[in-house]
Amino acid sequence: MSGIQEKLNIFRIRKPFYFLTLSIILAVVFFFSFLGNLKFYRSEISILFIPKSEEVILQSEQIIQNIIELPYRLSFYEKVLKDNKNIDDQLVGYSKDKRKELWSKKLKIDRRKNSGVIDIKIDARNRKQSEAIVEQTVFTLFGSVSQYYDVKKDIDLRIVDGPITSAHAANIPWLASLSLVAGIALSYLSHLISGSFIEIIHKRKVSPIETGNKNSEEYEKELSAQEELTQPAMKKYQAPGNLPVADDAYSAPEEDYEESLVPESDQSESSANQEEPTEDELKNRLNQLLRGGL
C-alpha cells in the first residue's frame, strides 16, 4: 500500500508538469493535423496592360477595372473549364450561386498601385491544378478582352511574371489558437480519467504483501477492531449481592470429592477382586464351570 501511495504522491506533485507537457504535445499534433487538411497552393501570374492610343490612355482606369472584373463571372469560370479539359471542376455539385461565390473566393485579382501591372492569383488544393487554372485564366482573359477591345490598335496585354506557386494555410493564428484549446481540453480530460483510475486502484486493490510492512501495533489494532465487529454483542450480568458466599475452608479438595462419589460396595468389590483365589477355590470354580453352574 505504501508503494501505491508513494506513486500517487509523485503523480500529484508532478501533475501540473505532466498537464502542461501533454497540452503542448497535443497542441502541436493538432496544429500539424489541421495544417495538412487546410493547406492549399496559390499560383500567381502578373500581366501588363499597355495602352496604344490616346483615346485608350484617357480611359485606362476604366479599361483596367473592366479587365479585373471580367474573370469573376461564373460564365468566365465555365469558359476556363471548357478551354482546358485537364482542369478538374473543384466546384462540382454546387448550385450556380454557390459556384460563383466559391469561384470569387478562389480567384484574386489586384492592381499594383499607380501602374498597369495586374496580379492574378488562384487558390487550389493541388499544386498542378493551381498552376493550370491560373495559366488558363490568363489565356481566357486575353481572349475575352479581345472581344471588347482592339488588341492590335488600342491595347496590348503581356505576361511579365509567373506562374509562381507557394503553399499557404488558412489563418495561421486562428489555427494555432484552435490547436492550443483542443490540446488543453484533451489533456485535461486524460488527467481526469487517469486520476480517477489511480484512485480506484488505490482504494480497491491492496496487495497482501504490503500488509506485512505495517508495524505490529497497527496490525494488532486492526485485528482487534475486526474482532469487535465480527463478535456478537453479549450482555454481561452481575450476580445479586444477597447470594451466600461459601468459605474457602469449606471447599473440599478435588480428589477427596471424586472419591466420595464412589459407593462403598464398589470399593469393597474392587478390593475383593484384587485378592488372589486359593487352589481349592480355583478347583471349585472350574468344576462349577464344567457343570454349567457359572
Image (cartoon, grey):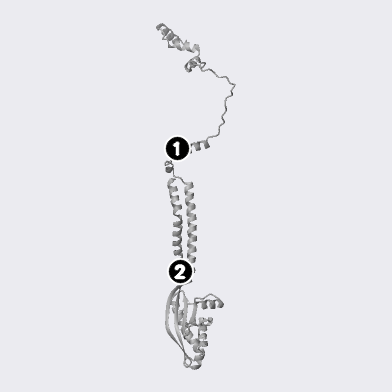
Residue at x 46% of width, y 60% of height? 23
Residue 213, placed above or below residue 27: above
**In the rendering, at what x and y percent does residue 267 appear?**
47, 12
Q: Position of residue 181 (x, y in %)?
A: 49, 63
Residue 89: % across, % down: 49, 77
Circle 1 — which element? Answer: helix
Work out whether residue 15 or residue 92 is closer to the camera in this orientation and state it.
Answer: 15
Q: Residues within 10 Å of mark 2 (few under 14, many from 20)?
A: some
Pointer 2: what residue? 35
Percent x, y for residue 10?
43, 51
Amino acid, disc 2 = Leu
Quarter of the figure with residue 14: bottom left
- In the image, what residue occupies the spot 43% across and 85% down? 159
Q: Earlier in the sequence, mark 1 or mark 2?
A: 2
* Res. 217 mark: 1
Contact (Cβ within 8 Å) of mark 1 with mark 2: no
Residue, far front? 114
Residue in the image at 47% along x and 51% along y: 198
In front of the other: label 1 or label 2? 1
| Element under disc 2 | helix
Q: Amino acid at mark 1?
A: Glu
Q: Residues within 10 Å of mark 1 (few under 14, many from 20)?
A: few
